[in-house]
Image: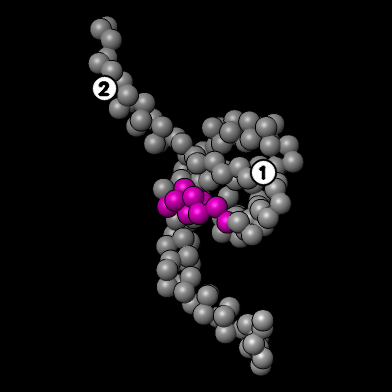
Amino acid sequence: APPHPKGAKQQGKKAIYRKKFTPANPRLPFLGRDNSFPSKLFEFVMTGKAVVSTKACGVEHVLREDGIYVDFNDLERSLSSKIREVSDMDRSGLERRGSRGRQRIVTEYNWDAQARRMVAFLEGVPKSRSPVL
């Protein structure tokens, strides 16, 4: 058979990639990590695909049971192992994880929900009686 034109071959690879790809968000332990939430996580979850990540920076509170977690203390081995495990997982199970994660972002982490959280937080901050210099 004659070779495929480069464009068609690339389009085929992209289609396979989009179908099977599970975004990864490995976060290494570093000072201040717990105060640094990776905003790209929301982008990954909005793809509707299951996400592989470390339990860091509050990620586990957003992904919950739908996250696929790796150990950041042994990241290279753990990530490699988890990628093999994910490649063997049932696609429908991965799709359910991704769908639930996306729905959670849409309903619990939209701008209105985030604004309500901020207002509640700020209302709970003690008011100072004297100016702080």
| Residue 86 is one of the magenta-drawn residues | no
> Residue pushed farthest front?
133
Disc 1: CA contacts within 10 A as few (<14), some (14-19) or many (>=20): some
Q: Secondary structure at mark 2?
A: helix
Residue 110 position, x and y percent, is: 43, 66
Residue 35 position, x and y percent, is: 64, 59
Q: Which mark is residue 28?
A: 1
Magenta residues, dominant SS class: helix
Which of discs 2 and 1 lies nearer the camera? The answer is 1
Q: Earlier in the sequence, mark 2 or mark 1?
A: 2
| Residues tagged 2 and 1 counted as in contact (Cβ below 8 A) | no
Q: Quadrant of the C terminus?
A: bottom right
3D distance between C-alphas at marks 2 and 1: 37 Å
Q: What residue range appears in magenta?
A: 37-46
Amino acid type of the residue that numbered disc 1 sits on in the rendered structure: Leu
Residue drawn at (69%, 31%) of the image: 77
Which residue is under mark 2?
A: 7
- On screen, 118 above or below 96? below
- On screen, 28 above or below 37? above
> Relative to residue 90, is residue 133 drawn left or right?
right
Amino acid type of the residue that numbered disc 2 sits on in the rendered structure: Gly
| Residue 41 is one of the magenta-drawn residues | yes
**In the image shown, does 50 or 27 lie closer to the viewer?**
27
Residue drawn at (63%, 55%) of the image: 57
> Residue pushed farthest bottom?
129
Q: Quadrant of the N terminus?
A: top left
Q: Quadrant of residue 12?
A: top left
> Residue pushed farthest top?
1
Q: Quadrant of residue 9?
A: top left
> Relative to residue 36, is residue 72 drawn left or right?
right
